[in-house]
Amino acid sequence: MKHIEKIFSIGLIILILSSCAVTKEYERAVSTNSITTYENYQKEFPKSKYKVDVEKRLAFLYEEQAWNKAVSKNTMYGYQDYLSKYPSGKNVENARKQIGKIEKQNEINKTWKSAKYENTIESYNSFLGLYPSSKYTYDAKSKIRRLKEENTWKIASDKNTINSYSDYLRSYPYGKYSSSASDKIGKLKEEKYVLPAWNETKRKNTYNTYSEFFNKYPNSSYAYLAKDKMIRIEQNDWDKASRINTIKSYKAYNNKYPYGAYVKTSEKKIIDLEVDKIFKGDYGKLPPMSKTSYGYSYNSTNAIEIYNNTAYTLTIRYSGADSKKIVLSPRQRTTTTLKNGKYRIAASVNAANVQNYAGNENLSGGDYGSEYYIKTESYKTWGY
């Protein structure tokens, strides 16, 4: 008897312990609330007192999982699969609504594809009439704008007139073909106005006519040709002046090309030739200039103070590394600068009875002074 009671007691204890484990694992599964924990619980305790509750919880989670999967895919098949598995589920209405939206979007997509295939203003307007607020609305309106612009450009190109291209630019000032339209207008204007002027300019074939054309049409396609002609004509005239190599030929060049490429060279040539002429004629001997300061050893220029102590207009010419002509009024004083080097110097006044004077100087950097004056029956220069 005592032995039976002992066995019963042990069995009771095991039963109590087992019941505690069932409850404890159930509570843990509920707190986790996942499909995996509930499935594991069912395997471990297939006949527990919580069996029905666990099955309900699993059924709820299975449906939630199926719905989330359908939402994630967001396809007709996904929602239909949910409905087939849970025809009475809590998301049935939502699933049907989503299927309706997808069906509508599929219809919109199909209509849009058809409109794009036709690619006409009418097909896009028809689409917008059916679906004014779809995700393709902006694209449809953009397509219409582009097609209208293309039509306007085609009309302009077919007519190929200044007015037709101007009409296009008024409608599409920043359009796809705005740059081309501006170029076309420029070319047509050239053909109408500039080409006849260019042909007339070529017929006359003079520097002045090319210059006038260039100034009037500086942005035309013929401007560079006009400029090239000007350069060639000037070069020919300069080459001619250089071959003749006279004061007259160089002055003729300067008069014709006051801003020419060789004006400075021409002016130097004139001074050099004028000094040559004086040296070849009858002239008095100029005394050396007075050096008033030696400056620094690295000086490459010379400052020369000149005083015209006569009653006449005095012209001094320096021919050398620099060539300069200086004209002074009576009793006028001035200062000029010359580079270092050897110079021929000639002086003359505007009086027929006064002799020219000439001499040579080797300037090596520093300050010089020259005073020019006239004595009875002679003309002398001296420097100090």
Image (cartoon, grey):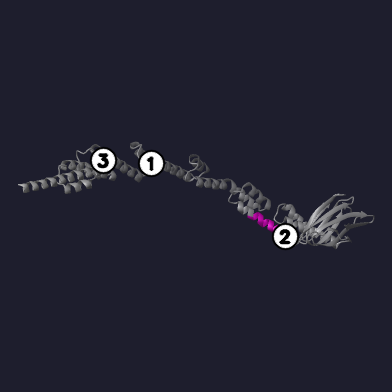
Residue at the image point whose x is 41% and y is 43% from the top: 147
Q: Nearer the viewer, residue 150 or 380?
A: 380
Boundaries of the magenta span: 228-239
x then y, percent, for residue 66: 23, 44
- Which residue is labeled 2 in the image? 240
> Is residue 206 highlighted in magenta?
no
Q: Amino acid at mark 3?
A: Ile
Which is more foreground, mark 3 or mark 2?
Answer: 3
Question: From where the camera sits, is residue 256 visible?
Answer: yes
Q: Nearer the viewer, residue 103 or 45?
A: 45
Q: CA distance from mark 3 to mark 2?
A: 95 Å
Q: Is residue 215 above or below residue 296?
A: above
- Determine the secondary structure under disc 3: helix
x then y, percent, for residue 342: 80, 63
Q: CA distance from mark 3 to mark 1?
A: 25 Å
Q: CA distance from mark 1 to mark 2?
A: 72 Å
Res 300 → quadrant: bottom right
Residue at the image point whose x is 19% and y is 47% from the top: 41
What is the number of the mark on residue 99? 3
